[in-house]
Amino acid sequence: MKLKAPSLAIVTLFCSFAFSTNAEKSSNSGATNDWKILFDGKSLDQFRGYKKDKPDPGWKVEDGVIKFAGKGGDLMTKGKYQFFEMALEWNLPKGGNSGIIYRVAETKGPAYHTGPEIQILSSMKVGGKTDAGSCYALYAPKVSNLKPNGQWNSVRLVIKPGNHVEHHMNGQKICSYQIGSDDWNARVAKSKFAKWKEFATVDKGHVCLQSHGAAIWFRNLKARELK
């Protein structure tokens, strides 16, 4: 049977929608349906300071945004995460340095003694192991898509069962690795992290937004568990 043009257009549209929906489900395979909102634009109820009961005064909520003026310690989630997906947006209004440190344990040292870090920086290039989007000092971004200072960058951190980790930034996967693999262990052994025996050994830990002396803003923070 020959379809008329309007009917053919409707069929094509339906098929495209179905394919898009299935692809989205496939990309989120293993994810629970419920996102946990970590920041509602109003309060820091889901956070406290690293090794502290409350956030440092330098972390404030203004205009629906978490803003850090540059003084104080790291801001840390109250909850702990093992296999999960976290989404957020960050903005360095004047440039500078920060990070997202995951699977953190509260020890005598700083958060980065136990947790690997997604670097936040005002520069980014392919191959830069300490540039924005990198797994700091270990794995460089394979894509350079940093927005200028003062604009928002979106990030997704995905840690799947088996310790496969992906960094996504501004809609593109920029970095991936497997914690505990031969490649990972070789890189750690050649880095400054080799002297920190607890580095990347925490199965389930907090996530820290790093204090590094620069003004940094965050918004739209949420997380969900992966199975």
Image (cartoon, helix red, strand yellow):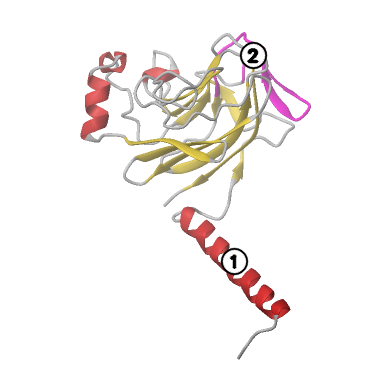
Q: Which residue is mark 2?
A: 215
Query: With respect to residue 174, does 48 lie above or below?
Result: above
Q: How many marks?
A: 2
Q: Secondary structure at mark 2?
A: loop
Q: Which residue is mark 1?
A: 16
Q: What residue is at 47 percent from the left and 58 percent from the top? A: 26
Locate the N terminus and report the quarter of the image it occupies. Answer: bottom right
- Residue 15 percent coordinates (x, y): 58, 71
- Residue 16 percent coordinates (x, y): 59, 66
The span from disc 1 to disc 2 (Cα, nearest Å) is: 43 Å
**Extreme residue in the bottom direction:** 1
Q: What residue is at 51 percent from the left and 40 percent from the top? A: 172
- Residue 63 percent coordinates (x, y): 78, 27
How packed mark 2 is, by other alpha carbons closer than 10 Å (few <14, some 14-19, many 20 or more), is: many
- Residue 189 percent coordinates (x, y): 23, 20
State left or right for residue 186 relative to residue 24: left
Report the mark closest to the observer, 1 or 2. 1
Amino acid type, callout 2:
Ala
Query: With respect to residue 10, does 148 lie above or below?
Result: above
Query: N-terminal of the two: label 1 or label 2?
Result: 1
Amino acid type, callout 1:
Ser
- Magenta span: 55-75
Q: What residue is at 47 percent from the left and 35 percent from the top? A: 80
Query: With respect to residue 49, does 86 lie above or below?
Result: below
Check if residue 72 falls in the magenta segment.
Answer: yes
